[in-house]
Amino acid sequence: KAKEAGRATYHFFEPGMDAKLQERRALEVDLRKAIEMDELELYYQPLIRLETNEISGFEALVRWQHPTRGTVSPADFIPLAEETGLIGAIGNWVLNRACADATAWPSHIKVAVNLSPLQFKNNALVLQVVAALGNSGLSGQRLELEITEAVMLHDTDATIAMLNDLRALGVRISMDDFGTGYSSLGYLRKFPFDKIKIDRSFIQDLSANPDSIAIVRAVANIGSALGMATTAEGVETEAELAQLRHEGCTEVQGYLFSKPRPAKEIHSLLARETCALQQVAV
Ligand code: C2E
Ligand code: MG
Ligand code: MG
Ligand code: MG
């Protein structure tokens, strides 16, 4: 058949491709089952507000506990979910799980949820957010949605309209991984962001590269001028923390404070926050 012929040709030019395709297809089949089999789990990583040195919220990061493969990284399965259309179901599951989990936290603690650009292609997205808030009873003010610059590549007017509808619910919008991909200052003017998350690559580079310091400083200044919070992602050292504080970032996130942890550990994270954070503060 044509399909098999095509694959045979492929195989001729790229040995090993067949095995890769088969592996991908197997992973796709497994991913389809993962939601109903309850194999997905949310981990949470604290966001720390530098003005108070206190946890202001947690970012939800999805984990897949595969029965035989072990933990599969979202960096591996989110792209697959996007290619196969499974991102819609996964994204909606994440949204509902995160809102439900956050209702168990103190009311000043927010939850941040990552959205795939593809979720903005679905007209029902705003209604799904309304439903997740309604079903959980979480106030819209406690939800932050993180989107990447790739969102801008799609229908800009429709995306802006959806972002405005979401903000009307009290939900805050964060620009994730800022500085990578298709960054444009124009987007910051066009889109109603509440927060800029500076990509980890700039933070990693801080001590070695004065240019990264200049870039972080500039982004913090832009954020401040535009009334947006600025979060530094991937803070791992005291030196980075001191530098970021000096440059005027308003929030930090990284292994220095905590790796992403299961939901059941949130309360102990909040309990130890005062002593642990005061050490890394000032
Ligand atoms: P992201 O949204 O930029 O999330 C931050 C990533 O940086 C997380 O990786 C986190 O574990 C990692 N990280 C945080 N602090 C540090 C640090 O100090 N050092 C290092 N080396 N890494 C740090 P993770 O959990 O593997 O997630 C990777 C990406 O997968 C996320 O990047 C996000 O783009 C995507 N993702 C995760 N969960 C979801 C989800 O529920 N929906 C969607 N659409 N994407 C998700
Ligand atoms: Mg994120
Ligand atoms: Mg990020
Ligand atoms: Mg990132």
Image (cartoon, grey):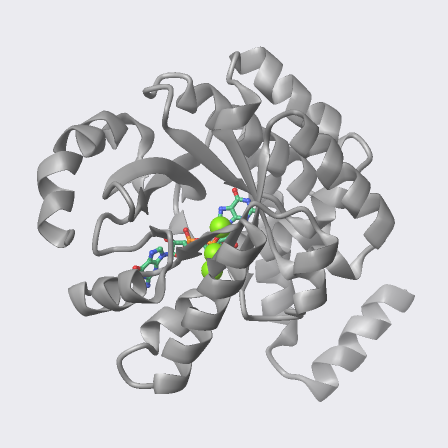
Q: Is residue 76 visible?
A: no
Residue sitting at x 65%, y 60%: 149
Residue sitting at x 42%, y 43%: 63
Residue sitting at x 23%, y 43%: 53
Residue closest to the far right = 2
Give the camera-side residue of 226 and 132.
226
The x and y percentages for residue 58 are: 37, 38
The quarter of the rendered structure image containing the C terminus is bottom left
Instruction: Look at the picture and state if 54 lies above or below 271.
Output: below
Left or right? Give the position of 149 relative to 212.
Answer: right
| Numbered label tally | 0
The x and y percentages for residue 219 are: 49, 66
Instruction: Look at the picture and state if 155 lies above or below 214.
Output: above
The quarter of the rendered structure image containing the N terminus is bottom right
Q: Is residue 98 visible?
A: yes
The x and y percentages for residue 239 are: 19, 69
Quadrant in the rendering for residue 44: top left
Quadrant in the rendering for residue 180: bottom right
Give the camera-side residue of 228 and 3.
228
The x and y percentages for residue 168 are: 69, 28
Quadrant in the rendering for residue 14: bottom right
Left or right? Give the position of 257 relative to 98.
Answer: left
Residue sitting at x 71%, y 55%: 151
